[in-house]
Image (spheres, rainbow, N blue to C red):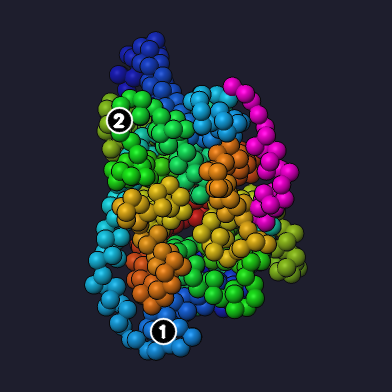
Amino acid sequence: MADMTVTPAATQRKRALPRINSRAVVMGLYLLFLLLPIYWLLNMSLKTNTEILNSFTLWPSNLTFANYATILTDPAWYMGYVNSLIYVVMNTVISLTVALPAAYAFSRYSFMGDKHLFFWLLTNRMAPPAVFALPFFQLYSSVGLFDTHIAVALAHCLFNVPLAVWILEGFMRGVPKEIDETAYIDGYSFGRFFVKIFMPLIASGIGVAAFFCFMFSWVELLLSRTLTTVDAKPIAAIMTRTQGASGIDWGVLAAAGVLTIVPGALVIYFVRNYIAKGFALGRV
Amino acid sequence: MEKTVNQKAWFLVLPVLLLVAFSAVIPLMTVVNYSVQDTFGNNQFFWAGLEWFREMLSSERMWDALGRQLMFSGIILAIEVPLGIFVALNMPKSGFWASFCLVLMSLPLLIPWNVVGTIWQIFGRVDIGLLGYTLDKLGINYNYTQDTIAAWVTIVVMDVWHWTSLVALLAYAGLKSIPDAYYQAAKIDQASRWKVFRFIELPKMMGVLMIAILLRFMDSFMIYTEPFVVTGGGPGNATTLLSIDLVKMALGQFDLGPAAAFSIMYFLVILLISWVFYTVMTNLDKREG
């Protein structure tokens, strides 16, 4: 203890100052590394193709929004966003609806085979989409669902339902069981208790699960591309259209890319403290 | 938490069971079906037994792809884990800057995977990309579509860019759970910065770090879209990883039998790693609860 009292506050501050600076430098460099490629995409999306190909500039000298206008006025383009949004929202709703009761069961009760079932769900989250691409294609073709939004939504349930169950179970475990028991004594039925009392208690968990279902369905391409041709084609697959006869339309490609980043960037602030938890399936 | 035994809980799990069975078990059975049969077209199938498995196990193509896959996963883990820990140690602990860093770091995680590929495809081009252009001007010969080394460097750097934040965020979550008392005790003992890391921070982070390593291993093991967009598996077969090879075989050449046998072996590996992952997770849960 003697050492602690001898150390004057002034030297401690002096020692602390450079350390904070070195931290800032490390973080600054790391964030620069992360943002530079994204900046480059944004930069290109605001240039004309002539400027992209003929002069190398660090920022657009002729600022143009023509690339964005191309996308937002051509149905062939913007329908891609609509298609993606439709199946992503469908998937999120389906995943959460089935995952909520299941997560409750896993967090509250032990029943025959519960551990095996929980593990089996995890293996589906880990299943490589490449293994499922061909069988899905044949399955949905044979039941006449090929090239529909629901086919993609159901296919994405493969990894999103396990994800939602695991995340929700993690949140539900934090709610004390006494709350359930009190509600049952007060004469609540299971359904009313679940909707009226329990769901508000884990609202943040539901939000986080919804965000991650949305995100993983949004970023996935292999399955959604395999299962669609025209009517339900996602934006990510339409982006290959820019490869025309006269070469690649870089400006429009970059603008389309920037627009796919927007949905994530819009809501990221609200889930910032749960991102680690979500990616680690509700544990951490 | 003590759980009550209640077999009726099965009814709550039933919807998930049916849905996942529809989207996982049925397709998987198709794969098993193909893996033991041969076809000459016209939907006529013949029993082929384990022939495809034998063929795949002795095919150089699969072993090469597996080798490349292991190399890729090994390299990215060797870079992302130390870098992630390093970044997490340097993150601000609380306040505005902590949120600021969290939001910006998460950004790459939320970009659609083919757009990640597109970003790096553009970024690395010598004529229009910042990275390629700069390297070219520095006199370094860099062409990821023709040079094997450049292609590998590009996809590795891309993966580091894409996923290091995940390791950092998990490590950060582990760091934040360490009570202040630990650091105070270390200060009294006059422990060096290295010792604080080695004996306090690292052991406390071990659990989440295991999750991070397993997640990164799994996800890099089934990576498809990003390298496919950037290199298309080339030059030659230099960056043809397992998933790329499998899709080429199944959807490109319609070699159903071998592709199915390939899928099943691929899946068994995944199953094994999932089991390790599950054990780590449940041990972690037990320790907390």
Q: Return the x and y of residue B122 as percentages of the image width and height.
A: 47, 38
Label 2: element kind: loop
Q: CA distance from mark 1 to mark 2?
A: 51 Å
Label 1: element kind: strand
The front one of B31 and A59 is A59
Main SS category, magenta section: helix
As drawn, the residue found furthest toward the front would be A246
Query: Magenta includes A43?
Result: no
Q: Is residue B47 left or right of residue B189?
A: right
Q: Is residue B191 left or right of residue B230?
A: left
Question: Residue type at mark 1?
Answer: Thr
Q: Looking at the rendering, in which quadrant would you find the N terminus of chain A? A: top left
The span shown in magenta is A61-85
Q: How many numbered markers are drawn?
A: 2
Q: Return the x and y of residue B131 as percentages of the image width and height.
A: 41, 32
Identify residue for label 2. Answer: B140
Crowd tier of the residue under label 1, counting other residues whose Cα lies within 10 Å: few below 14, some 14–19, many 20 or above: some
Crowd tier of the residue under label 2, counting other residues whose Cα lies within 10 Å: few below 14, some 14–19, many 20 or above: few
Residue visible at 30% across and 43% down in the picture: B147
Query: Magenta includes A70?
Result: yes
Residue visible at 46% across and 68% down in the picture: B251
On screen, residue A262 above or below A174? above
| Mark identifier at residue B39 | 1
Residue visible at 58% across and 65% down in the picture: A227
On screen, residue B126 above or below B53? above
Is residue A100 visible in the rendered image? The answer is no
Q: Return the x and y of residue A112 as percentages of the image width and height.
A: 50, 78
Is residue A242 visible in the rendered image? The answer is yes
